[in-house]
Image (cartoon, rainbow, N blue to C red):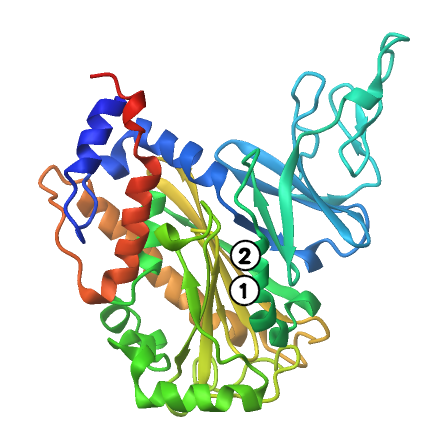
Amino acid sequence: MDKQTLLALIDRHPEKTALSQEFYMDEDIYDRDISEIYLKSWLYAGHASEIPTVGDWFLFELAGESVIIVRSAEDEINALLNVCRHRGSKICLEKKGCNKILVCPYHAWAYGLDGQLRGAPYMADDFDKSKISLKKIKTELLEGLIYINFAEQPASFTPIRNALTECLTPYGLHKAKVAHKQTYSIAANWKLSVENYTECYHCAPSHPEYSRGHSLSKPNSRSTELMKDVMSRAELCGLSNKSFNRYYLNAEGFGADYGYERYAMWPGHSTGSDDGKPVAPLMGDIKGYDGGTTDFQVGPVCFALAYCDHVVIYRFTPTGLGTSECEISWLVNADAEEGKDYNLDRLIWLWDVTTLADKRIIESNASGVSSRYYKPGPLSEMEDFTWMFLSWYLDSIKPPEKDVVP
């Protein structure tokens, strides 16, 4: 699709209406999704506990790009493009590992953990290794959570850090560990996956396991007496009673969204589990259960749900025009022992069963959107956050008028 056609398609899009079919099925639009959104936004890469010792690394992969997330010093983490500066071979071929030097398996060019070229066999005498290094991707660490940004000049991470650090500190995320990580492949365009996450209009009919414990399945759940009770107990339990959001078009910089918003669990439910009872020790410095849970977000496609005893982190990534992935990480205290302090099946049950249901829902949605008779409909009030995402999305991929040839 040329830029003039895309501009016209965006300009005529009605307010608070689902996207037209082209946005899910056009290859040129998908390419803009990658270049204008994913390669310019802050993205959750992983948790610092996954690379505890110097030399530990894992790969972050997106849209044909591969990045080595490596602990280069006790207090330093680097994100290095996994592309040798000699002839472009991938350096790290496994999903994770530990190396003091990163050696390309093709011609044995060797790089330090800072990306600097350290050795290159049989090169000319005047070859200057100091001028060659692996491309560094911008990296930020927030309470143990690793975020990266491919942009040469990304939006500042400072507003995110300033806003969220105090609120997240009680959870002790920098002292947490990944108890389990799972990737769910979804046969649908990435936007359908994100749209589904950004609304709970579907929760009551589609997620009985979630809805029996979480008040967000009902409209206006953040303005009820139940919610007031939760907020009145928050400080006694060591939690912040703040609430704020700077999402999408209201973000302080492109792809630098952030927010911290709490909502109530239904009475009798302390956490997200099959019976509402705790599944792990209290996180960090939290002193008790206040009857609520916390949504927090960093960037446009990475979300988290923080219970008092565990934290669930969602990341959505495109893997093709009609395919995407949802990666979920379950975090618990670093000193919690599986089998003693938590049962892994109980810990992951709710968000595993919910995500498997979402996978079916999203793939069914994708099938319908591909119909030659599909016509987008109006959104409900419970989909206001979805519209925030969609309106930002349309603005983000919109070609500047100066670039459009009449």
Q: Amino acid at mark 2?
A: Pro
Left/right placement of residue 226 relative to residue 293 reads left
Residue 316 in percent (x, y) is at: 44, 50
Left/right placement of residue 37 relative to residue 24 reads right
Q: Residues within 10 Å of mark 2 (few under 14, many from 20)?
A: some
Q: Are marks 1 and 2 in contact (CB under 8 Å)?
A: yes
- Depicted 197 relative to depicted 80: above or below: below
Residue 298 in percent (x, y) is at: 50, 56
Residue of label 2: 159
* Position of the C terminus by quadrant: top left
Left/right placement of residue 153 relative to residue 86 reads left
Task: Give the CA distance from mark 1 to mark 2.
Answer: 6 Å
Q: Is residue 255 visible?
A: yes
Instruction: Between residue 165 and residue 300, name the one nearer to us.
Output: 165
Instruction: Between residue 261 and residue 172, name the one nearer to us.
Output: 261
Q: Amino acid at mark 1?
A: Ala
* Callout 2: SS: helix
- Depicted 285 relative to depicted 382: above or below: below
> Which picture quadrant has residue 381?
bottom left
Residue at coordinates 59% horizontally, 67% vertically from top-left? 331
Q: Residues within 10 Å of mark 1 (few under 14, many from 20)?
A: some
Residue of label 1: 163
Instruction: Between residue 353 and residue 14, name the one nearer to us.
Output: 14
